Amino acid sequence: MSPLCGGIDVGGTKIASALFDENGEISARDKIAIDRRGGDAAAAQVAGRIEALADAAAKAGGTLAAVGIAVPGIAYSASGQVWAPNIPGWDRYPLLDKVRGHVPLARRAPLVLVSDRSAYVAGEAWRGAAAGARDAVFLAVGTGIGLGVISGGRIVHGHEDIAGAVGWFALDPGFKPAYASMGCFEAEASGSSVARKARERIAAGRSSRILDLAGGRAEAVTAETVAAAARAGDALAREIVAEAVTYLSMGVANIVSLLNPETVVLGGGLFRAADLFLEPVRREFRRWAQPLAARAVRIELSKLGEAAGLYGCGRLAWQYYQEQERGHVPEVHVPPRTRPGSAHRKRRNKRRDAK
């Protein structure tokens, strides 16, 4: 029976799943609404997706070899816990233990747990805008801002699996109250912040077509509304877009200077308005970035769109399976950390015993 690998992309409103062969071709795909109660109910849905993938693999004449699971937040790979603020109850929630408890022993496949941003960059490096790149990043700009990083062909997780939280980039020395809860970069350039700025300035008396396009309701103003007004020549909308472009360019420049990637992939809801953001960011980031790194990098739009995370889950599951087959210890399953100071004590005791 040929191996197949599954991907499960958990979002704030849906759970998408797919079955992949080793070349990234999909043989089964599904999407369901997430149980808004969160907690164990949402974990049971993830387990159900694993069961469905195992059934689909069997029908295709194969076997489910591994499953990648992405969550919208932080995936603590060593413990199998997750922090996903959009899902009730998923705060240091033991997702892998709960899922394994729901899946019968005979149907269990190895599980690879990652953050959504890591899945995004893995997907784009497999079948998307960064295909084949060993040094690539995915900058997701939507409700928030996050970064997935591949360096030397490996996902960068960080010491506490928090690497990529670039929404907290400090780009403005004039600290504003909003920065305390979401970070400077996110407060200035995310899609939700673009909409918030429009609402605040209209409430302060600025005239704009933005409100007309939102049906006269300030609460209905979105980043898409601002983009539409900017295309129509609205002065306030163009001002807000220009501010976002400046901060996005600074953020991309910092990423390029720090990581020297081959490709920066831009995705998320804000970049659906690529006509307003892509070329300006491509031009302006060079003013701020290390010149050699800026000349070497490609700035591309996501090719996979909202499917990037799903493809990334499939890719990381395949990498896990292939490393196991070669007899390697897969890097996505980190052993529990040694207690602080224990390595020092072992060296000290060894020296003492040798005396």
Image (spheres, rainbow, N blue to C red):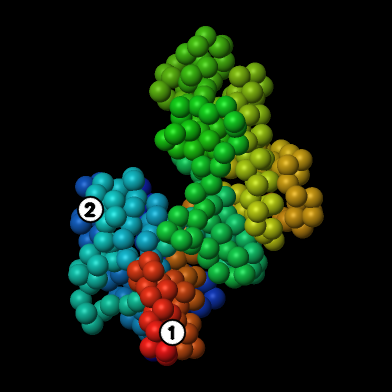
Placement of the C terminus among the 4 image quadrants: bottom left
The residue to which callout 2 is attached is 39
Which of the pair 117/1 is nearer the observer?
117
Instruction: Please tell me which residue is depicted at 46% across the width and 29% down the height of the picture.
Output: 178
Q: Secondary structure at mark 2?
A: helix
Q: Quadrant of residue 339?
A: bottom left
Q: Quadrant of residue 296?
A: bottom right
Q: Residues within 10 Å of mark 2 (few under 14, many from 20)?
A: some
Instruction: Please tell me which residue is depicted at 60% across the width and 57% down the height of the picture.
Output: 137
Residue farthest toward the top in the current orientation of the protein: 205
List x then y, in percent, for residue 93.
Answer: 27, 56
Against 295, residue 317 (above or below) is below
User: Of tags 1 and 2, which is closer to the observer?
Assistant: 1
Q: Is residue 192 left or right of residue 82?
A: right
The residue to which callout 1 is attached is 351
List x then y, in percent, for residue 81.
Answer: 31, 61
List x then y, in percent, for residue 289.
Answer: 73, 46
Callout 2, which amino acid?
A: Gly
Instruction: Please tell me which residue is depicted at 66% across the width and 29% down the height of the picture.
Output: 242
Q: Residues within 10 Å of mark 1 (few under 14, many from 20)?
A: few
Instruction: Please tell me which residue is depicted at 34% across the width and 46% down the height of the picture.
Output: 85
Q: Is residue 97 left or right of residue 83?
A: left
Instruction: Assess whether mark 2 and mark 1 are in contact (beta carbons under 8 angstroms).
Output: no
Callout 1, which amino acid?
A: Arg
In this view of the protein, can residue 61 be seen by the observer? yes
Placement of the N terminus among the 4 image quadrants: bottom left
In this view of the protein, can residue 283 be seen by the observer? no
Ranked by sequence position, the earlier of labels 1 and 2 is 2
